[in-house]
Amino acid sequence: MAAIETREKVAELGDKYKYGFVTDIEMERAPKGLSEDTVKYISAKKNEPGWMLEWRLGAFARWKEMREPNWARVHYPKIDYQDAYYYAAPKNTPKKQSLDEVDPKLLETYKKLGIPLHEQMALAGVAVDAVFDSVSVATTFKDKLNEAGVIFCAISEAIRDHSELVKKYLGSVVPVSDNFFATLNSAVFSDGTFVYVPKGVRCPMELSTYFRINANNTGQFERTLIIADEGAYVSYLEGCTAPKRDENQLHAAVVELIALEGAEIKYSTVQNWYPGDENGLGGIYNFVTKRGDCRGARSKISWTQVETGSAITWKYPSVILRGDDTVGEFYSIAIANHFQQADTGTKMIHLGKNTKSRIISKGISAGKAQNTYRGLVSVHPKAEKARNYTQCDSLLIGGECGAHTVPYIEARNPTARIEHEATTSKIAEDQLFYCLQRGIPQDEAVSLIVNGFCKEVLQQLPMEFAVEAQKLVSISLEGSVG
Amino acid sequence: MNAPISTLDARRAKAVEAFRVKGVPHRRVEEWKYSDLHAVLGADKVEQAGAAKWAVETLPRGVELFDLAAGNPPDWVQQRLGSLSNTGAMEAASLAFAKSGFALRVAKNGSGEVRVRFSGEGQARVLVVLEESAAVTLIEEADEFSGFQNIGVELVLGPNARLTQTRLTPKADQAIRICEIAASVAKDAVYRAHIADFGGKLSRTELHIGLDGAGAETHLSGVGALNDGHADVTAHVVHASGKTRSTQLFKYVAGGHARGVYQGKVTVAEGANGSDSRQTAKGLLLGNRAEIDLKPELEILADDVQCAHGAAIGDLDAESLFYLRSRGIPEAEARALLMRAFIGDAVDQIESESVRASVWQAVDAALEGLS
Amino acid sequence: MLEIKDLHAKVDGKEILKGLTLSVGAGEVHAIMGPNGSGKSTLSYVLAGRAGYEITGGSITYKGEDLTTMSPDQRASKGVFLAMQYPVEIPGVTTLTFLKTALNAQRRARGEKEVDAVGVLRLVREKAAAMKVSEEMLKRALNVGFSGGEKKRLEILQMALFQPALAVLDETDSGLDIDALKLVAEGVNALRAPDRAMLVITHYQRLLDYIVPDRVHVLSAGRIIKEGGKELAHELEAKGYEQIIKDAA
């Protein structure tokens, strides 16, 4: 009974994906399919130096030998990698002197997305490197960042202008042949973001990138590389949306973070790619490799993610705690509704002494969705006094969804302390009744309770993101309780 | 689900095939990630392992015993033996190749204590059938030996039956000891198992438990006290029916080169509302070359459930240790005291006083080498 | 204000209320007393409209409207408040956020203007002082880690904040020491008003020394078996439920 109501209610949700518009801009594309020629085409389009092309071709050669992983709890039809475009860019990319020169349609898109790109930006104190499909279109706030010595640019630009840094760090956290999707990305990544914060510099503002997949049948393969040099600090925000289309689109990104001695990187994601409709048609396949390396002593890397979108999510933002006294954190909210499938979690690899990690994961399943937390805490023999705390909670809404928890705990040092707790339950009927009795309607009550359930994670987000994330949590679950 | 296979012969034939396809499991097989059997055992050793010796030392009156080595098994054996067979390679091997073993049947309302001893190398198969409201304590002991032993156990619990099993495996550095237990627990029946493992070259107890009727319960507990060697408990509890309950409590102490492994998976099937499950696994790591691996897993496909697991690994609490020493207790003794305290609640799950005493004895012997 | 006629209600397929009739006028305070299992809590949940409490006969009329067809949140917006015996914990939702959400949801449902955060805080502070609810408590998650007394004080604070027309107090005295009981009773008494009716459900007469009722009803096996003035409570205390029930039979 309740299940039928739920089904009816969630059916109404289909139209609520507010980012589901398509921007009609003429695109320039690489020929369909994937071959060495595609890789060369992309490299040439980007005016890349020879070493970069070699790197890509090396990755492509490895990729051809690799198999798509099948261990995650996600099911999807076989992807035909030859039936997609690997490069798409707005035609006549202008050499922008100012925002006024940017295609107004594009700016209109950003407006719909709610990105404050104009003067509001100054007030918000956010610099946005907006990636529209594959090309970085507009970068603001360069001056202020320049002053601090912070490099914040498209990775294609960094490959040309800061090649020493890129050569040194690219692929140093996620090796070229790390996994199937990361290797694919290494061969065909089209653009992405590069950040370098020099020694001792505290980045003067939150850095933010909005990615958007617009062109149809286009995979997006962005590549992000963030380096915080000794004693530096940077907070980076990433938001993702994509238009509504019936076919599935592939998104295989790689993000590498490097924190040198005493540095700190905070990386926040609000992922709201198109999740597909209420029948499971369409939606993004989000196969992402994110990894941070606390390379220097006393460094810290913190991942915060709010995953509400995508038909399939496959991502495990991880931290290698290499330096002594380093800290890794993972705060996650993953919501799966309708036919969404999420398999997400983290790896905390303790290598150094006195390393600490903390994992807080909140998974919410509704409709017919499957939501899996998969995580590894590994303490190596030399990681004296390593510490981990993991709290992993799942909430089920309706009887047709699934919530799964798969933690791996491996300890090889006797001074390590690891604590892991997990719970799975549904929204308690008495909580719901209490809210109703005080006059709060059902949907609002669900949203209130779920936001409360997620609070520890939401608190980690910068203020302006937290508000958006809270709204997303509510929208994603509207009508899910019958 | 596979359709039930009609005859024992057919089930055996299928098991032979299953083992030959899968071979001896290695660490790239997810369930054997932490216990690489392939590294210590060849497939030919499995097929030619011979018959493990067994002896039923006490048998209450009214309990039927059938020696599987004898021909012409009665109908109740024909029907049930191999019927709980799953797809695990080693379970298939024990069904396929075991030339010894026994079957027990406890009639309705029957009760008593059964003591079994396994000794030496080889494979064996065991079937225990409890009819409605039967209540049995099954105590399994083993002799020290070296070599390979593989025992497949099937437990069929009828409505409202009670089966309390204790498996005590003494330290045996050169033993490769595998045991697969499959249990089907009917309505209102309760299956309890305690696994006390003191380590081998590779020692593993697998449990596959189906809570198949409303009110069914299972309570699993165990200790691994290892001053070297390897001990693995891999348990999968399936709440196939609603209103079922499961608890798990496992404690490991590992020193020297020991490796303690716990993999516990709880599945709540679709529609199995009102299921309740708790899992706790804790490890005390005492050696620089020791390792503890814990993987408590939840697979939940129904919404009206209460499921939780906790896992922790650590060393002895320095403050407690200091406190005890400040009261004049020498360090070694204080450490042993704390280790005993750590393991205690798991050992206390054992109902039989005599078994509890022998487990404590073995625990103390193992801890002596550690403190 | 409230007219209950021949009310029958089932929980889990079992009939708990078996023909309960009760009338409470505006400005009146009625006490419902009864032994365990007599149907006291069922009555309060039926009035609030909790799912699983099925009405199988009779009627409940509130301010001339049929209460039984309204959802629980509609009833709340129309002024039905239930102070619960076991107030529920909601982790992660601060008490103040909860109060603001509830107050504004009720106002919205009534077509009134919502109150902004500052306004809510001002309103809450006004009420909080009397109930000795500290600012620190307001910042904590709703009822999480609150003592029994704190939870009950917060219930009365909400009653003061929402200004209901009909307040049902379900075993508000349970788990309270004498000081807390006095404080809660003072809070309730302060809310007695000519346009407000109250239904005080309790097992013991103790609470009624502090909240003096106009009428007392004895509930047994799902029906009112005896009615009287406030002296009935004392009679109950002296004789015990068993005797009273016997006498009534």
Image: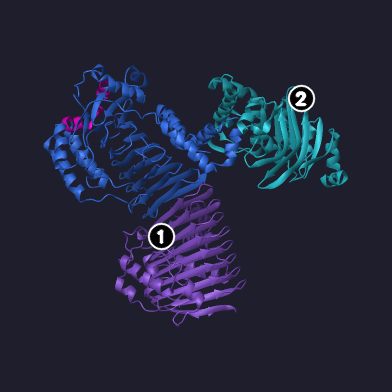
Chain colours: A blue, B purple, C cyan
Residue C200 coordinates in the image, percent (x, y): 74, 34
Rendered residue at 46%/66% (across/down)? B182
Residue C37 coordinates in the image, percent (x, y): 73, 46
Q: Secondary structure at mark 2?
A: loop
Q: Secondary structure at mark 1?
A: strand
Main SS of the magenta segment?
Answer: helix
In the rendered image, which residue does mark 1 sit on? B261
Whether residue A202 appears in this view of the structure is no
In the rendered image, which residue does mark 2 sit on? C27
Residue occupying the far left of the picture: A50
Residue occupying the far bottom of the picture: B70
Rendered residue at 18%/31% (across/down)? A162
Query: Vertically, is A55 above or below B240?
Result: above
Q: Does B350 lie within the magenta span?
A: no
Rendered residue at 74%/32% (across/down)? C199
Disc 1 crowd rating (10 Å Cα; few below 14, some 14-19, many 20+) is: many
* Chain of the residue that carries numbered disc 1 in the rendered image: B
Residue occupying the far right of the picture: C247
Whether residue A117 appears in this view of the structure is yes
> How far is mark 1 from mark 2, CA to CA?
68 Å
Residue B4 coordinates in the image, percent (x, y): 44, 66
Where residue A312 sits, quadrant-wise, is top left
Dots 1, 2 in contact, CB < 8 A? no
Left or right of A244? Residue B187 is: right
